[in-house]
Protein backbone atom coordinates (compact mmCIF):
# COMPACT_ATOMS: atom_id res chain seq x y z
CA UNK A 1 0.00 0.00 0.00
CA UNK A 2 1.34 3.44 -0.93
CA UNK A 3 1.42 6.39 1.46
CA UNK A 4 -1.11 8.16 -0.76
CA UNK A 5 -3.51 5.24 -0.40
CA UNK A 6 -2.98 5.11 3.36
CA UNK A 7 -3.56 8.85 3.51
CA UNK A 8 -7.06 8.36 2.13
CA UNK A 9 -7.80 6.12 5.13
CA UNK A 10 -6.26 8.74 7.42
CA UNK A 11 -8.62 11.42 6.08
CA UNK A 12 -11.54 9.11 6.84
CA UNK A 13 -10.29 8.36 10.35
CA UNK A 14 -10.66 10.05 13.70
CA UNK A 15 -6.93 10.46 14.17
CA UNK A 16 -3.91 8.30 14.97
CA UNK A 17 -2.81 6.41 18.06
CA UNK A 18 0.01 4.03 18.98
CA UNK A 19 -1.56 2.96 22.29
CA UNK A 20 -4.58 0.65 22.50
CA UNK A 21 -5.47 2.28 25.82
CA UNK A 22 -6.18 5.48 23.88
CA UNK A 23 -8.18 4.03 21.01
CA UNK A 24 -11.09 6.20 19.86
CA UNK A 25 -13.77 5.10 17.42
CA UNK A 26 -12.54 5.09 13.80
CA UNK A 27 -8.95 5.92 14.70
CA UNK A 28 -5.89 4.43 12.98
CA UNK A 29 -3.78 2.21 15.22
CA UNK A 30 -0.05 2.01 14.42
CA UNK A 31 1.51 -1.12 15.91
CA UNK A 32 4.93 0.16 16.94
CA UNK A 33 7.58 -2.09 18.44
CA UNK A 34 9.93 -1.34 21.34
CA UNK A 35 12.51 -3.09 23.43
CA UNK A 36 9.90 -4.66 25.69
CA UNK A 37 6.74 -4.71 23.59
CA UNK A 38 5.38 -5.50 20.14
CA UNK A 39 2.34 -3.48 19.09
CA UNK A 40 1.49 -6.08 16.47
CA UNK A 41 0.19 -8.36 19.21
CA UNK A 42 -2.47 -5.77 20.10
CA UNK A 43 -3.71 -5.18 16.54
CA UNK A 44 -6.83 -7.33 16.82
CA UNK A 45 -7.65 -5.77 20.20
CA UNK A 46 -7.38 -2.34 18.61
CA UNK A 47 -9.97 -3.28 16.00
CA UNK A 48 -12.29 -4.66 18.69
CA UNK A 49 -12.02 -1.36 20.57
CA UNK A 50 -13.16 0.62 17.53
CA UNK A 51 -10.07 1.35 15.44
CA UNK A 52 -10.86 1.79 11.74
CA UNK A 53 -7.62 0.06 10.68
CA UNK A 54 -4.54 -1.37 12.38
CA UNK A 55 -1.22 -0.80 10.60
CA UNK A 56 1.11 -3.74 11.28
CA UNK A 57 4.44 -5.10 10.03
CA UNK A 58 4.14 -8.74 11.14
CA UNK A 59 2.19 -10.85 8.66
CA UNK A 60 1.12 -13.45 11.22
CA UNK A 61 -1.09 -10.81 12.86
CA UNK A 62 -2.87 -9.94 9.60
CA UNK A 63 -6.10 -11.71 10.46
CA UNK A 64 -8.58 -9.46 8.63
CA UNK A 65 -8.80 -6.92 5.81
CA UNK A 66 -8.71 -4.17 8.43
CA UNK A 67 -5.13 -5.12 9.30
CA UNK A 68 -2.90 -3.19 6.87
CA UNK A 69 0.48 -4.85 6.40
CA UNK A 70 3.47 -2.56 5.74
CA UNK A 71 7.21 -3.13 5.67
CA UNK A 72 7.91 -1.06 8.79
CA UNK A 73 5.28 0.62 10.97
CA UNK A 74 7.53 3.40 12.33
CA UNK A 75 8.81 4.54 8.93
CA UNK A 76 5.25 4.38 7.60
CA UNK A 77 4.03 6.58 10.46
CA UNK A 78 6.80 9.07 9.70
CA UNK A 79 6.10 9.05 5.96
CA UNK A 80 2.38 9.56 6.54
CA UNK A 81 3.12 12.55 8.80
CA UNK A 82 5.46 14.07 6.21
CA UNK A 83 2.81 13.65 3.50
CA UNK A 84 0.17 15.22 5.75
CA UNK A 85 2.46 18.13 6.46
CA UNK A 86 2.79 18.82 2.70
CA UNK A 87 -1.00 18.71 2.29
CA UNK A 88 -1.50 21.15 5.18
CA UNK A 89 0.77 23.74 3.54
CA UNK A 90 0.89 25.97 6.66
CA UNK A 91 3.68 27.78 8.51
CA UNK A 92 5.43 25.39 10.88
CA UNK A 93 7.91 26.55 13.50
CA UNK A 94 10.58 23.98 14.38
CA UNK A 95 11.98 24.39 17.88
CA UNK A 96 15.02 22.76 19.47
CA UNK A 97 17.83 23.55 21.91
CA UNK A 98 19.46 22.26 25.07
CA UNK A 99 17.28 24.08 27.60
CA UNK A 100 13.91 25.81 27.64
CA UNK A 101 12.30 24.14 24.61
CA UNK A 102 8.99 23.26 26.21
CA UNK A 103 8.53 26.53 28.09
CA UNK A 104 9.38 28.48 24.93
CA UNK A 105 6.93 26.36 22.91
CA UNK A 106 4.15 27.03 25.40
CA UNK A 107 4.87 30.77 25.41
CA UNK A 108 4.89 30.94 21.61
CA UNK A 109 1.60 29.07 21.47
CA UNK A 110 -0.01 31.39 24.02
CA UNK A 111 1.05 34.43 21.99
CA UNK A 112 0.08 33.10 18.55
CA UNK A 113 -3.22 31.72 19.90
CA UNK A 114 -4.32 35.34 20.24
CA UNK A 115 -4.68 35.54 16.44
CA UNK A 116 -4.42 32.03 14.97
CA UNK A 117 -5.60 28.46 15.44
CA UNK A 118 -2.34 26.90 16.65
CA UNK A 119 -1.48 23.24 17.09
CA UNK A 120 1.68 22.51 19.07
CA UNK A 121 3.56 19.55 20.48
CA UNK A 122 1.80 18.24 23.56
CA UNK A 123 3.94 17.51 26.60
CA UNK A 124 7.34 16.19 25.53
CA UNK A 125 6.26 14.30 22.39
CA UNK A 126 9.33 15.60 20.61
CA UNK A 127 11.13 12.51 19.30
CA UNK A 128 10.95 10.30 16.19
CA UNK A 129 7.50 9.10 17.26
CA UNK A 130 6.19 12.25 18.94
CA UNK A 131 6.93 14.57 16.02
CA UNK A 132 4.88 12.50 13.53
CA UNK A 133 2.03 12.28 16.05
CA UNK A 134 2.15 16.05 16.51
CA UNK A 135 1.94 16.64 12.76
CA UNK A 136 -0.92 14.15 12.35
CA UNK A 137 -2.86 15.96 15.11
CA UNK A 138 -3.00 19.06 12.91
CA UNK A 139 -6.18 19.42 10.87
CA UNK A 140 -7.68 21.73 8.24
CA UNK A 141 -8.43 24.29 10.94
CA UNK A 142 -4.77 24.57 12.02
CA UNK A 143 -3.25 27.85 10.81
CA UNK A 144 0.21 27.57 12.42
CA UNK A 145 2.03 24.52 13.77
CA UNK A 146 4.74 24.47 16.44
CA UNK A 147 6.88 21.33 16.51
CA UNK A 148 9.28 20.78 19.39
CA UNK A 149 12.23 18.59 18.42
CA UNK A 150 14.37 16.85 21.02
CA UNK A 151 17.59 14.98 20.38
CA UNK A 152 20.30 13.09 22.25
CA UNK A 153 22.55 12.20 19.31
CA UNK A 154 23.70 13.46 15.93
CA UNK A 155 21.40 13.23 12.88
CA UNK A 156 18.25 13.16 15.04
CA UNK A 157 17.28 16.80 14.39
CA UNK A 158 18.09 16.22 10.73
CA UNK A 159 15.56 13.36 10.64
CA UNK A 160 12.88 15.27 12.54
CA UNK A 161 13.34 18.32 10.31
CA UNK A 162 12.94 16.16 7.21
CA UNK A 163 9.60 14.95 8.58
CA UNK A 164 8.23 18.25 9.91
CA UNK A 165 9.59 20.39 7.06
CA UNK A 166 9.60 23.60 9.16
CA UNK A 167 9.46 26.96 7.37
CA UNK A 168 10.73 28.67 10.53
CA UNK A 169 13.10 27.58 13.26
CA UNK A 170 14.48 28.62 16.63
CA UNK A 171 17.28 27.11 18.73
CA UNK A 172 16.90 28.17 22.36
CA UNK A 173 20.59 27.65 23.21
CA UNK A 174 23.53 25.29 23.01
CA UNK A 175 24.11 23.84 26.50
CA UNK A 176 25.54 20.74 28.15
CA UNK A 177 22.57 18.43 27.64
CA UNK A 178 22.84 14.78 26.52
CA UNK A 179 26.64 14.88 26.52
CA UNK A 180 26.66 11.09 26.60
CA UNK A 181 24.89 10.83 23.24
CA UNK A 182 26.48 13.80 21.49
CA UNK A 183 29.97 13.02 22.79
CA UNK A 184 31.05 16.62 23.44
CA UNK A 185 29.89 20.22 23.51
CA UNK A 186 30.99 20.49 19.88
CA UNK A 187 28.75 17.52 19.11
CA UNK A 188 25.82 19.26 20.81
CA UNK A 189 26.33 22.40 18.71
CA UNK A 190 26.60 20.36 15.52
CA UNK A 191 23.51 18.27 16.38
CA UNK A 192 21.23 21.18 17.28
CA UNK A 193 22.46 23.15 14.23
CA UNK A 194 21.01 20.47 11.96
CA UNK A 195 17.84 22.60 12.17
CA UNK A 196 19.78 25.56 10.77
CA UNK A 197 21.13 23.34 7.99
CA UNK A 198 17.60 22.33 7.01
CA UNK A 199 16.39 25.94 6.98
CA UNK A 200 19.36 27.00 4.88
CA UNK A 201 18.72 24.30 2.28
CA UNK A 202 14.97 24.96 2.18
CA UNK A 203 15.19 28.78 2.19
CA UNK A 204 13.47 28.91 5.57
CA UNK A 205 13.70 31.60 8.22
CA UNK A 206 15.50 31.35 11.57
CA UNK A 207 14.63 33.41 14.63
CA UNK A 208 17.96 34.43 16.17
CA UNK A 209 18.94 35.80 19.56
CA UNK A 210 21.80 38.05 18.47
CA UNK A 211 23.10 38.33 22.04
CA UNK A 212 24.16 34.69 21.61
CA UNK A 213 27.31 34.67 19.48
CA UNK A 214 26.96 30.92 18.86
CA UNK A 215 23.48 31.36 17.38
CA UNK A 216 24.79 34.13 15.16
CA UNK A 217 27.77 32.06 14.02
CA UNK A 218 25.81 28.86 13.38
CA UNK A 219 23.07 30.66 11.40
CA UNK A 220 25.31 32.44 8.90
CA UNK A 221 23.77 32.31 5.42
CA UNK A 222 20.20 31.81 6.64
CA UNK A 223 17.46 34.41 6.28
CA UNK A 224 16.66 35.43 9.83
CA UNK A 225 14.51 37.52 12.13
CA UNK A 226 16.55 38.72 15.09
CA UNK A 227 15.92 39.94 18.61
CA UNK A 228 18.22 41.04 21.41
CA UNK A 229 18.28 42.77 24.77
CA UNK A 230 18.30 46.05 22.82
CA UNK A 231 15.00 45.37 21.06
CA UNK A 232 13.34 43.45 23.91
CA UNK A 233 15.09 44.64 27.07
CA UNK A 234 15.37 42.60 30.25
CA UNK A 235 14.18 44.55 33.29
CA UNK A 236 14.25 42.28 36.35
CA UNK A 237 13.81 38.77 37.76
CA UNK A 238 13.17 38.99 41.49
CA UNK A 239 11.87 36.35 41.32
CA UNK A 240 9.49 36.92 38.36
CA UNK A 241 10.87 37.93 34.97
CA UNK A 242 9.88 41.38 33.72
CA UNK A 243 10.71 42.65 30.24
CA UNK A 244 9.50 45.35 27.85
CA UNK A 245 8.33 45.58 24.26
CA UNK A 246 6.98 48.47 22.19
CA UNK A 247 6.79 50.67 25.28
CA UNK A 248 4.86 48.04 27.26
CA UNK A 249 6.21 46.53 30.48
CA UNK A 250 5.50 42.80 30.58
CA UNK A 251 5.49 41.03 33.95
CA UNK A 252 5.54 37.24 33.61
CA UNK A 253 4.83 34.45 36.07
CA UNK A 254 8.15 32.81 35.23
CA UNK A 255 11.17 32.80 37.52
CA UNK A 256 14.84 33.03 36.57
CA UNK A 257 16.62 35.39 34.20
CA UNK A 258 17.15 32.42 31.88
CA UNK A 259 13.41 32.52 31.15
CA UNK A 260 13.82 36.04 29.77
CA UNK A 261 15.16 34.56 26.53
CA UNK A 262 12.18 32.21 26.25
CA UNK A 263 9.84 35.16 26.71
CA UNK A 264 11.78 37.35 24.27
CA UNK A 265 11.63 34.65 21.58
CA UNK A 266 7.85 34.37 21.97
CA UNK A 267 7.48 38.16 21.75
CA UNK A 268 9.66 38.26 18.61
CA UNK A 269 7.58 35.56 16.90
CA UNK A 270 4.32 37.18 17.93
CA UNK A 271 5.49 40.45 16.43
CA UNK A 272 6.60 38.75 13.20
CA UNK A 273 3.22 37.06 12.81
CA UNK A 274 1.49 40.41 13.45
CA UNK A 275 -0.07 39.72 16.83
CA UNK A 276 -1.12 42.99 18.48
CA UNK A 277 1.40 44.21 21.09
CA UNK A 278 -1.26 44.46 23.81
CA UNK A 279 -2.28 40.86 23.10
CA UNK A 280 1.36 39.72 23.23
CA UNK A 281 1.64 41.32 26.66
CA UNK A 282 -1.62 39.69 27.80
CA UNK A 283 -0.53 36.26 26.58
CA UNK A 284 2.86 36.40 28.33
CA UNK A 285 1.38 37.65 31.58
CA UNK A 286 -1.37 35.01 31.59
CA UNK A 287 0.97 32.05 31.01
CA UNK A 288 1.40 29.96 34.15
CA UNK A 289 4.13 27.27 34.19
CA UNK A 290 3.08 23.72 35.00
CA UNK A 291 4.48 20.18 35.00
CA UNK A 292 7.36 20.84 37.42
CA UNK A 293 8.86 23.58 35.24
CA UNK A 294 9.71 26.89 36.94
CA UNK A 295 6.70 26.58 39.23
CA UNK A 296 6.30 28.66 42.37
CA UNK A 297 4.40 26.81 45.07
CA UNK A 298 3.58 28.26 48.47
CA UNK A 299 2.87 25.83 51.30
CA UNK A 300 2.26 27.34 54.71
CA UNK A 301 5.54 29.06 55.62
CA UNK A 302 7.60 27.63 52.74
CA UNK A 303 7.98 28.97 49.19
CA UNK A 304 9.12 26.36 46.66
CA UNK A 305 10.74 27.06 43.30
CA UNK A 306 10.10 23.74 41.56
CA UNK A 307 12.18 23.09 38.44
CA UNK A 308 12.39 19.31 38.52
CA UNK A 309 11.41 18.38 34.98
CA UNK A 310 14.92 18.28 33.60
CA UNK A 311 18.50 19.22 34.48
CA UNK A 312 21.92 19.47 32.88
CA UNK A 313 25.04 21.43 33.83
CA UNK A 314 23.98 24.53 31.87
CA UNK A 315 20.45 24.76 33.27
CA UNK A 316 21.67 23.87 36.77
CA UNK A 317 24.22 26.69 36.72
CA UNK A 318 21.63 29.17 35.44
CA UNK A 319 19.15 28.18 38.15
CA UNK A 320 21.77 28.58 40.89
CA UNK A 321 22.95 31.95 39.58
CA UNK A 322 19.37 33.18 39.53
CA UNK A 323 18.62 31.85 43.02
CA UNK A 324 21.74 33.59 44.31
CA UNK A 325 20.28 36.95 43.29
CA UNK A 326 17.40 36.72 45.79
CA UNK A 327 18.06 39.00 48.72
CA UNK A 328 17.12 39.05 52.41
CA UNK A 329 15.56 35.59 52.46
CA UNK A 330 16.48 32.18 53.85
CA UNK A 331 17.61 30.14 50.82
CA UNK A 332 17.78 26.33 50.67
CA UNK A 333 18.90 24.43 47.58
CA UNK A 334 17.98 20.79 46.87
CA UNK A 335 19.70 19.36 43.80
CA UNK A 336 19.25 15.93 42.22
CA UNK A 337 21.54 14.00 39.90
CA UNK A 338 21.90 15.05 36.26
CA UNK A 339 21.57 12.19 33.77
CA UNK A 340 23.07 11.38 30.34
CA UNK A 341 26.43 13.05 30.94
CA UNK A 342 28.60 10.10 29.95
CA UNK A 343 32.24 10.14 30.97
CA UNK A 344 31.98 13.71 32.29
CA UNK A 345 29.35 12.70 34.85
CA UNK A 346 31.55 12.98 37.98
CA UNK A 347 33.34 16.12 36.78
CA UNK A 348 30.12 18.00 35.98
CA UNK A 349 28.49 17.09 39.30
CA UNK A 350 31.60 18.24 41.17
CA UNK A 351 31.51 21.57 39.33
CA UNK A 352 27.88 22.17 40.28
CA UNK A 353 28.50 21.18 43.90
CA UNK A 354 31.50 23.53 44.06
CA UNK A 355 29.50 26.37 42.53
CA UNK A 356 26.67 25.91 45.02
CA UNK A 357 29.13 25.86 47.93
CA UNK A 358 30.45 29.31 46.96
CA UNK A 359 27.05 30.98 46.93
CA UNK A 360 26.39 31.21 50.67
CA UNK A 361 23.04 29.45 50.63
CA UNK A 362 21.64 28.66 54.07
CA UNK A 363 21.64 24.96 53.21
CA UNK A 364 22.61 22.91 50.15
CA UNK A 365 21.32 19.34 49.80
CA UNK A 366 22.53 16.93 47.10
CA UNK A 367 20.52 13.81 46.26
CA UNK A 368 21.41 10.88 44.02
CA UNK A 369 23.99 8.19 43.35
CA UNK A 370 26.43 10.60 41.71
CA UNK A 371 25.98 13.59 43.99
CA UNK A 372 26.40 11.36 47.04
CA UNK A 373 29.62 9.84 45.66
CA UNK A 374 31.55 13.07 45.12
CA UNK A 375 33.43 15.16 47.66
CA UNK A 376 31.43 18.31 48.31
CA UNK A 377 31.95 20.99 50.93
CA UNK A 378 29.20 22.59 52.98
CA UNK A 379 26.49 20.23 51.74
CA UNK A 380 24.31 17.40 52.97
CA UNK A 381 24.48 14.38 50.65
CA UNK A 382 21.98 11.57 50.24
CA UNK A 383 22.16 8.58 47.89
CA UNK A 384 18.40 8.55 47.28
CA UNK A 385 15.15 10.37 47.90
CA UNK A 386 14.28 7.72 50.49
CA UNK A 387 17.42 8.38 52.54
CA UNK A 388 16.79 12.13 52.30
CA UNK A 389 13.21 11.64 53.49
CA UNK A 390 14.38 9.67 56.55
CA UNK A 391 16.46 12.66 57.65
CA UNK A 392 13.84 15.23 56.67
CA UNK A 393 12.65 17.73 59.29
CA UNK A 394 10.04 20.14 58.02
CA UNK A 395 10.86 22.76 60.64
CA UNK A 396 14.26 23.28 58.98
CA UNK A 397 12.46 24.75 55.97
CA UNK A 398 10.08 27.18 57.65
CA UNK A 399 10.21 30.77 56.35
CA UNK A 400 12.56 29.68 53.55
CA UNK A 401 12.59 29.76 49.78
CA UNK A 402 13.55 26.32 48.50
CA UNK A 403 14.94 25.65 45.03
CA UNK A 404 14.35 22.07 43.86
CA UNK A 405 16.09 21.02 40.64
CA UNK A 406 17.14 17.69 39.15
CA UNK A 407 16.72 15.38 36.17
CA UNK A 408 13.28 13.92 35.49
CA UNK A 409 14.32 10.46 36.62
CA UNK A 410 15.01 11.78 40.12
CA UNK A 411 11.32 12.71 40.57
CA UNK A 412 12.21 15.45 43.05
CA UNK A 413 8.66 16.80 42.94
CA UNK A 414 8.08 14.23 45.69
CA UNK A 415 9.76 16.70 48.04
CA UNK A 416 6.86 19.11 47.60
CA UNK A 417 4.56 16.69 49.39
CA UNK A 418 7.05 16.38 52.24
CA UNK A 419 7.22 20.16 52.58
Image (cartoon, grey):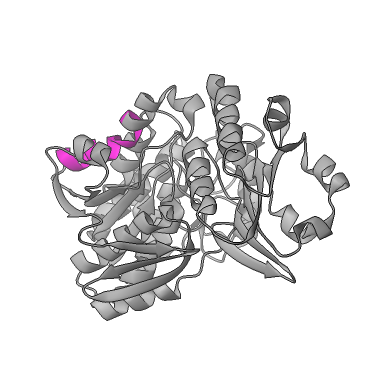
Query: The C terminus appears in which quarter of the rendering?
Result: bottom right
Relative vertical location of residue 281 with respect to residue 259 in this rendering, above or below: below
Horizontal placement of 291 versus 154: left or right?
right
Q: Residue 33 versus residue 344: which sits nearer the camera? A: 344
Q: Quadrant of residue 388?
A: top right
Is 197 a magenta residue?
yes
Q: Residue 357 versus residue 75: which sits nearer the camera? A: 357
Horizontal placement of 71 versus 92: left or right?
right
Type of secondary structure dominating the magenta stretch: helix
Whole-percent x and y of residue 418? 79, 58
Whole-percent x and y of residue 187? 37, 25
Whole-percent x and y of residue 239? 50, 63
Relative vertical location of residue 122 with respect to residue 376 in this rendering, above or below: below
Q: Residue 162 versus residue 407: which sits nearer the camera? A: 407
Write the residue at 29% across / 69% down.
Answer: 244
Relative vertical location of residue 153 with respect to residue 147 in this rendering, above or below: above
**How many marks do you count on the picture?**
0
Is 359 a magenta residue?
no
Q: Which residue lies furthest to the top in this view?
A: 343
Relative vertical location of residue 108 with respect to residue 373 in this rendering, above or below: below
Write the residue at 37% across / 53% down.
Answer: 147
Q: Residue 339 versus residue 132: which sits nearer the camera? A: 339
What is the magenta range? 190-201
Write the residue at 68% across / 31% down.
Answer: 377
Whole-percent x and y of residue 148? 39, 50
Residue 138 visible somewhere in the drawing: no
Query: The N terminus appears in which quarter of the rendering?
Result: top left
Horizontal placement of 244 versus 21: left or right?
left
Q: Which residue lies furthest to the right in this view?
A: 390
Q: In which quarter of the image is residue 374?
A: top right
Q: In which quarter of the image is residue 22?
A: bottom right
Residue 180 visible somewhere in the drawing: yes
Amino acid sequence: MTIEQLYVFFTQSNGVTTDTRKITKNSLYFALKGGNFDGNTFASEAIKQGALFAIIDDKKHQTSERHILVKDVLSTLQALAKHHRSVLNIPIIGLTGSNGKTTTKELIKCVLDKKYKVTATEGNLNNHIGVPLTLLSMDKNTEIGIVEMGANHLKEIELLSSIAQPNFGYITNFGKAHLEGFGSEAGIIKGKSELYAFLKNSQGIAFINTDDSLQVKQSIGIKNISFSSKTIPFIAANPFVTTAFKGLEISSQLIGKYNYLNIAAAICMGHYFEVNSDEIKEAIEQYTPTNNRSQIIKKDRVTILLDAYNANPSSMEAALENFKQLRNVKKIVILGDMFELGESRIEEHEKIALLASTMSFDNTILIGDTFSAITAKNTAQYASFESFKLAFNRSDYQDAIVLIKGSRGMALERIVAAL
